[in-house]
Structure formats: structure tokens, C-alpha cells
Image (cartoon, grey):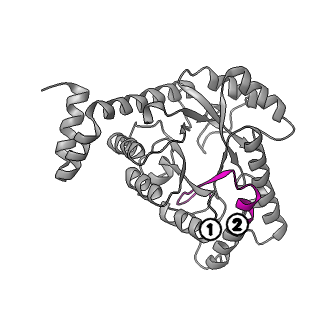
Amino acid sequence: MLESTRFSVLASTFSPHRDRFLPSPQGPPPTPVQLIETAAAIAELSGIELIHPAHVTFENLAEIRAALEAHGLDCASVAASISSRWEYQGGSLTADDPAARRRAIETVKTGMDLAAALGAGRINLWLGRDGFDYAFQVDYDQGWGRIVEALREICAYRPEIRIGIEYKPCEPRKRLLVSTAAKAVALKRDVGAPNLGVLLDTGHALVAQENLAESVAFLARHEALVHVHFNDNYRVADDDLIVGTVNFLETMEMLYWLERVGYEGWLSFDPHTALEDPVRAVEEGCKFVRGLIHTLERIGRAEIERAIATRQVTEMMALVNRELFGPS
């Protein structure tokens, strides 16, 4: 099943990235159409994720749609950004200012409209400002309640559009309210809307000290897995490294479980490279993931399940070693 899975990329992957100790690069950033053109040059990609309002609005919708059609790309998802404006510094869906909460809700609704217009069928929603930095800083119950109330309205607005909550333990706030797979599922339960689910970003899950495959299995059990982002890190910070460069075996196990639970969505890449060429990063990431899928297929599900049943990781290592390095 994963053999036929389509790959996409987050458009901002191709924008310049620097660390916080270096000044921003000089010169204008690439236009949304240029980002689409760059993605289209990567043979493995058939989709791109666009951010509203950074990349797509109703003002440039016709231009974006024309560019996607001209380059043979689908819009995999629209990310509704409510974490990158100063007015949301202290919260977006949890803001104390009702007007700020209303603007955030309307931004997400517009993102849903754009997703529908582009045939995406889903949006990404990261609540990066809805959290806290210190003890005694926020009313936790009030904050969670505001998120639930806002999402009930958002989900009811377009029930045909799926919403993937992109959980993350921290950043930019030191602690986020929707911080783990389990809390994202709890949020889905509290909202009670069938179109609300979870976006599993591998980097966020790693920083949350989760096992990637276990998170897949858990989210699938609760019918919550909407979308997947691939990147990597050392479990200390959300480094957005190239997929598989750090956590090789866990990424492989995650792909096995995506196949096992019948995941049929996109596999999307979002490395943020400071030194490496982002195009090469995505190209090699696609090849790496495709190679792991082929390796798993050659081993076969029955053999993998047999290895798991032994509870001895050496049995799985032997299968991987045989496929990657040949008979000893």
C-alpha cells in the first residue's frame, strides 16, 4: 500500500533558512509560484503544502491554481498559520483578547476555504502560541476550553475538510497545551467532531520523546491520523533535519506501521536546511523513504511479525542486515 503513497513537500522548505545567531539572508524571498516550480522539478513529488496567508490567499488563488496545474502538482494540504503574527504572541485560540481569538478562527476558516478550492481536502493546524512559559502564568483549564470551543466552530464550518492538529511539546512557547499524541487525541475526543484529527510530525514526536511507530499505532487506533510530516532530530530540539539521518531504525519501523494500519494519506517532507541544498535534501529524503518501503516489502510482513513476536530485536536486525548488506 505504501508503495503507491504519494510524496509532497512543505513549500517553505525551499525558502532560505538560518539559525538564530545569523542575520536573515539578503534579497527577496522566493514567490509562491517559484516555490511550486522548485517542487515540480523533483521527480518523486506529486504534491506541495501551502501556507495561508504566506503562500496562498484568495487574492492569488487563481495564480496558484494555474501554477499547480501547469506543473502537474496537487495541493496536498493548506497550513493555516496562526502562530506567526505579533498579535498572537500570547496566544491565538487561547488569547485573552476575544477579537484576536476571532481573527485566528477566521484565518483557519479561510484556510479551509482555500483547501476546498484547491482540492486538498485537509488543513494543518499548529497551535504554537497556545501554551505557557512559567508556572502561574495561564489558566490551563480556561486555555484548553477555549481551544475546544474554537475547534468546535471550526470543524462545523466545513465538515468535509479534515483538520490535522500538529502537536508539539514546545516552541515558540516553552510548553504547548497540545504537546503529545495522547493530548491531541484527548482534544479530538473533547471536540467531538469527526473531521478533527492529528498531523504526526516526526520531529515533534521525537522531541516529545515518543516512539514514532507507537504514535502511528496509537493515532490509528483512535482513527485520528490525518497527515504525516517527515524530518529528523536528536530529540533535543526541533531541528528539521533530513529524514533518516539520525533515527534510521525508528523511521523504518514507523513506515512498517503506517503500512500495517492502512494509512492512505500523503507522506510529506519538511527539512529546513541551513547548509545543505534543500532540493537535494528533499530528493534524497524521498529516495531514502522509498528505499525503506522497498526494503520492508522484500522482507515481508510475515517475517517482520515473526521477528516482533520473538521480542528479540536481533531477529529484526538480522532481516535488515540481510536485505541491506547481503548474506554474511
Which residue is under mark 1? Answer: 192
Residue depicted at 48% across the width and 31% down the height: 4
Amino acid type of the residue that numbered disc 2 sits on in the rendered structure: Arg
**Left or right side of 230 for 154:** right
Vertical placement of 152 versus 23: above or below?
Answer: below
Q: Are marks 1 and 2 in contact (CB under 8 Å)?
A: yes
Q: Which residues are magenta?
A: 151-172
Query: Which kind of residue does numbered mark 1 sit on?
Result: Gly
Give coordinates of residue 88: x percent, y percent: 75, 60
119 shown above or below 201: above
Quarter of the view holding residue 31: top right
Q: Secondary structure at mark 1?
A: loop
Between residue 90 and residue 183, name the one nearer to us.
Answer: 183
Answer few, some or many: residues within 10 Å of disc 1's Cα (few below 14, many 20 plus, some between 14 and 19): some
Q: Secondary structure at mark 2?
A: helix
Query: Which x, y percent locates residue 289?
Result: 42, 33
Q: Which mark is residue 152?
A: 2
**Residue 170 among magenta residues:** yes
Residue 50 or residue 100, whichever sits in front:
50
- Quarter holding the C terminus? top left
Asked whether residue 165 is in view, the answer is yes
265 left or right, relative to 148: left
- Residue 304, by quadrant, is top left
Q: Earlier in the sequence, mark 1 or mark 2?
A: 2
Q: Residue furthest left?
A: 328
Rendered view: 263 above or below 167: above
Q: Is residue 174 shown left or right of residue 252? A: right
Q: Is residue 236 visible?
A: no
